[in-house]
Image (tube, rainbow, N blue to C red):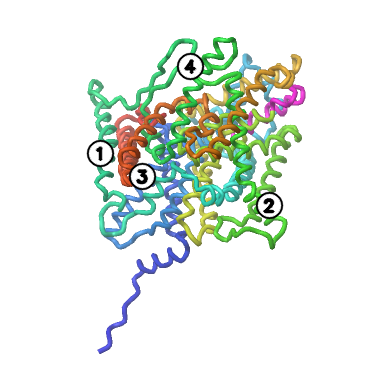
Amino acid sequence: MASPERTADPFEQDSTLAESTGGVTVRAVVSGLVLVLGLDALAIHLRYVVHGSLMTYSHVPMAMLIVFTLMITAGAVLARFSRWKLIPAEWHTILAMGVVGAAVPGFGLSGYLLGYIATPYYFATEVNEWNTYLHPYISPWLVPSDENKAVTWFFEGAPKGAQIPWDAWLLPLLWWTTFIVAAFVVLACVAVVFRRQWVQNERLAFPAMAPLIHMAEEPGSGRFVLPDFTKNYLFWIGFGLAFGMIAWNCINYFLPGFPRFPVYRGRWYWIDRQHPPAYGFLGLFTIFFSYFASLDVLFSIWFFDLLFIFEGGWLHRRGFTAISPYYYRGVYYWQTKGAFAMLAASVFWVARRHLRDVLRSTWHRNEHPDDKDEPLSYRAAVLAAFVGLGFMWLWLWRIGFDPLLAALLLPAVVFTYVGLAKILAETGMPYTNVPAGPWGLVSPFISGSAVNESTRVALRFASRITSHFKGLFLPALVHAGRVAEGVRGGRRRLMYAVVLAFLVSFVASVLFTIQLGYRDGAYNFNSWEIVRAGPKHFDGTATSVKNFLTKEPDPPVYREHPDYVAFFGLGGLATLLLIFLRHRFVWWPLHPVGLAISGSYLARRTSLTILLAWLVKLVMLKMGGPAVYRKSRPLFIGLLVGYVLGVALSAFIDVLWFPERGHSVHRF
């Protein structure tokens, strides 16, 4: 008797289709957009309404981690009870979309953008003289007009029943969007060009992505109600420790006298007042990612922070301007700037053969490296990058930027952001800022008379794109390139998904923030990026324009401060020596990345946490060797997941019981 014909299982068909498309399926892309919209809403609401934890300040934004963790947990439950499951390649797609989308809201871009373009007219007074030294140099299409109190209502809230004046924002946002999209195209192409070099040739660790990739590779299989990465008992030990501490501290919200774990308190510890202090803070979030970095990188970050304390103090006692007193300044800042510039230059030097092949593929179709598995062909990436840079140059020129200076600034932007992205790919530090901005690499060699008043104002507006402290979108795009290793055969489609995630995140975060401003009054956000950054920076710009018009222009830095140039060269030479020693001697323990960020704001605040991560990993390797270290990874993934869900619990409590009086659980 013939057996009955077996009906095709639609869920098996979905899995087969997912594997054949490399994981970039419709359901994966839709899930990625859900992740992006969820993190946008969470980040903006908690930041501007609840006033809770920092959701987008780090390079691995907490808002993305919360939504991704909840989604992958929900996916495991669905796989267990409904036979609907996403394969690991699809979770890689979702993760890549989330990493890029999370680079937009709040501290990423939208907060600074809206704060900057709304500031010039609302905060103008007779005292700050913006109407004389700022307004004449602002193109009318660059900022929204306050006609009919459009900007005033944004900061103070619209009257009851009034409609949001979208027409006041439409033209400025349209033109800013063209500039931002051009910048995204350029940085996405740069990330494509460097992806193989860093992921496959140099095999960088990408510590910030390591635990998330592990989670994406072990989602719900349908045999267990939770994701597979939770099966190890070490995971639950770590989860219990991290989640338990935060949950315990949440009791203090309701009972102020209830004891708390002191995991969020930091303070400065002084040797004496002639030396910079050390910052004592148990940054659990930093430890979770730093544990996946190499020992020499971790040790070097702390070692060179210690060098800053003693060298900065020594220079200060001898009359040099070197400390602030907490961070670098003067000659030490220039030493760090020289070190960072040399480190960034070494990135291009190490990749010179790869970059040569990429450029050859642009001009000669038959001479190209194998780029079939890249998110974009090298030829398309190079050409699109040059077109994007050309549009950015034209845009800067149209807002008043000197065309020659704009032509110098844009390559410096790429150079600087590549340097920061390489640092993040090696260290995994979730809190890292650019130690030397692009304009800071160009301006020292230019006389003050060459930077006219319109260029100074244009530079301030463009700085949110050309001098972003987090490197704008490039670190996120580079991390997404590492995640793309799990999307084999579908990386071209993944590029479209990532672009879609960026566009959706940008539009959603801008619209959501504007809507909240007119509902609650953006001044009540009490946020740095929207309320305070603009007035502070435009005050400095107006003063700069006033001095340019009324005083003798400043000479180039190399003439006025030859000591700065000397320390710039000293930092560069020291970094060059460190690079040589690392390549010459396998045992050499110091990595140049430590010197390249020494004394900077976020490096100072996380150095002791990095030291603790180094000690934990060192003890683990010395006592048990690499095998024990590999087996201990579930512990740190459990710590991370427990911490993330603990922050989510605190946010949930704040939304329900403490609206507008949230608790800052997650910070650096």
Q: Is residue 133 above or below residue 19?
A: above
Residue behind mark 1:
240
- 463 part of magenta stretch: yes
Residue behind mark 2:
359
Residue behind mark 4:
276
Identify the image quadrant of residue 272.
top left
* Relative image position of residue 141 (x, y in whole percent): 67, 36
Most common SS among magenta residues:
helix
Which of label 3 and label 4 is nearer to you?
Answer: 3
What secondary structure is marked by label 3? Answer: helix
Distance from Cα at disc 1 to Cα at disc 2 = 51 Å
Distance from Cα at disc 1 to Cα at disc 4 = 37 Å
- Mark on residue 626? 3
Distance from Cα at disc 3 to Cα at disc 4 = 37 Å
* Relative image position of residue 236 (x, y in whole percent): 25, 43
First of labels 3, 4 by sequence position: 4
Q: Which residues are magenta?
A: 443-464
Identify the image quadrant of residue 64.
top left
Which of label 1 and label 4 is nearer to you?
Answer: 4
First of labels 1, 4 by sequence position: 1
Q: Is residue 106 left or right of residue 286?
A: right
First of labels 1, 2 by sequence position: 1
Pointer 2 local density, CA inside 10 Å: few below 14, some 14–19, many at least 20: some
What secondary structure is marked by label 4? Answer: loop
Three-letter code, disc 1:
Gly
Asked if marks 2 and 4 touch (Cβ < 8 Å), the reply is: no
Three-letter code, disc 2:
Leu
